Image (cartoon, rainbow, N blue to C red):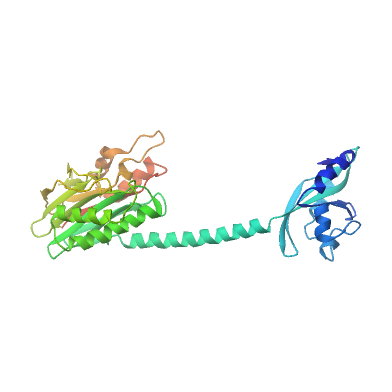
Amino acid sequence: MYRAGKETSQMNIIDGMIDWVRVVDKNNIVLYANKKMKEDLGDITGKLCYEVFCSEGRCDYCISKSTLSDGTVLHKEANINNRTYMVISSPIRDESDEIICSVEVFRDITNEKELTRKVSEKNKKMSEDINFAKNMQIRMLPPKGMYHGLKLDYLYESSEQLSGDFFDVFKIDEENTGIYICDVVGHGVTASLLTIFVRQSLRTIAKGGIELNKIMKELHKTFLSLNLDYDRYFSVFLGIYNKTTQEMKYINAGHNSEPILLRNVSEISLLNAKGYPIANIFDNVKYEVKSIKLNVGDKMFLYTDGITEAEDDEGVQYGIDRLIDVITKKGNILNNLKISLNEYSKTHKDDYAILMAEII
C-alpha cells in the first residue's frame, strides 16, 4: 500500500525495478510508468490502461477496478505480446486515506510457466512409465490357483508405486517346482528392478539343476557382476518342492521373516535356516539346506517384514504372533489378514507381500 505523501521516494525505488510498474487513476488513465515499462513500451502516460496493450476495451476481469473500489489487493495472470505476466494491483491513498489510484506491478513469469509446463510433462511421462513398470511387475507374479502340485493365493501391496518385495513360483521340471520370496532393500524403481533381476536369474539358474547351494552361489555370482553399491542387497527364502515325494528342500539367505507352515488347521511351525543375504560384502556364500516332508492340505506362508513390522498409531509392531493368530482362524485367511492389517496400521510405510501355497 502506498500513500501520496511518500510518492517521490517510492517512485525512485520503483524506477529501478525490472518489473513493469504503472499507476492508473479511476478513469483508467495511466499517470505513471516506471523506467523499465517505458523502455519496453514507450511513453504510455496519459493513455488508457488497456490501450497500452492494443486492446479496444477494458479487460474482462479488471483487477484495478476492484482495487479502486474497495482497496483490495488482487492479482491475475495476463498474456501480453506473447508473454505471460503476473499482475498485482494495490491501492494508493491520499492523506485523507481516500483511494485515488491503483499501482499495478507486471512480473514476467513466461519462463517460469514454461518450466512448469515442461516439468509437468516430464512428471506425467515418468508417472506413465512407473505405472507401466508397476503393471509389468504385477503381471510377473505367479497366477493364483492350481500350479504344479500347489494351490496359490497371495496379497501384494507396495508403499510406493513400485515394490521391493517379490515372490515367484516356477516349474523346474516335471517333478520339481521352485518357490521363493525376496525383499530388496529400499523402495521404488531401483528396488523393483532388482526384483526383476532375481526373478529372471533364479528361473534361468534353476533350469541347470536343483542343488540349492549351487543355485545360490550362481545367483550371488551374477549379482556381484552387476557392480552395484554396497548398500544394494536383498534377502531371499528359496524352496524346491518335489510333488512326487512331497518333500521340500529350502534355504534362507538372510530373510528374517521365517515362513510359516500350517498343518491340520492349527499346528504351526517355522521354516528356519541360517544364511546371509545376497550382497557385495561377501565373496563366497554357503547356506544351510533343510528338508521337510509335506502333506496334502498343508499350507505354507512366505511373507516379508512389511507385515510383521507394520505399526499402529503408538509405534507397536504387528508382530508374528498376530500373524499366526489370523492364519489359524477360520475363514478366508488372506482376506482376514488384509482386514486385520488395515485396521491395525492406517498407513503402511513399507512394502508387504505374503504368498500362501497349499499342498494339493
Near-viewer residue (165 or 301):
165
Residue farthest along the left direction in this orientation: 245
What is the x, y in percent for residue 177?
17, 60
302 on left or right of 292: right
Residue 78 seen anywhere in this rendered image of the structure: yes
Taking 290 as reference, is 134 above or below it?
Answer: below
Q: Quadrant of the N terminus?
A: top right
Near-viewer residue (356 or 258):
258
Near-viewer residue (125 or 229):
229
138 on left or right of 296: right
What is the x, y in percent for residue 33?
85, 53
Residue 144 seen anywhere in this rendered image of the structure: no
330 on left or right of 231: left
Taking 346 as reference, is 20 above or below it?
Answer: below
28 on left or right of 263: right
What is the x, y in percent for residue 116?
60, 57
* Residue 242: quadrant of the picture: bottom left
What is the x, y in percent for residue 113?
64, 58
Q: Quadrant of the C terminus?
A: bottom left
Number of marks in the image? 0
* Residue 218: quadrant of the picture: bottom left
Q: Residue at x 29, y 38 (%)?
A: 319
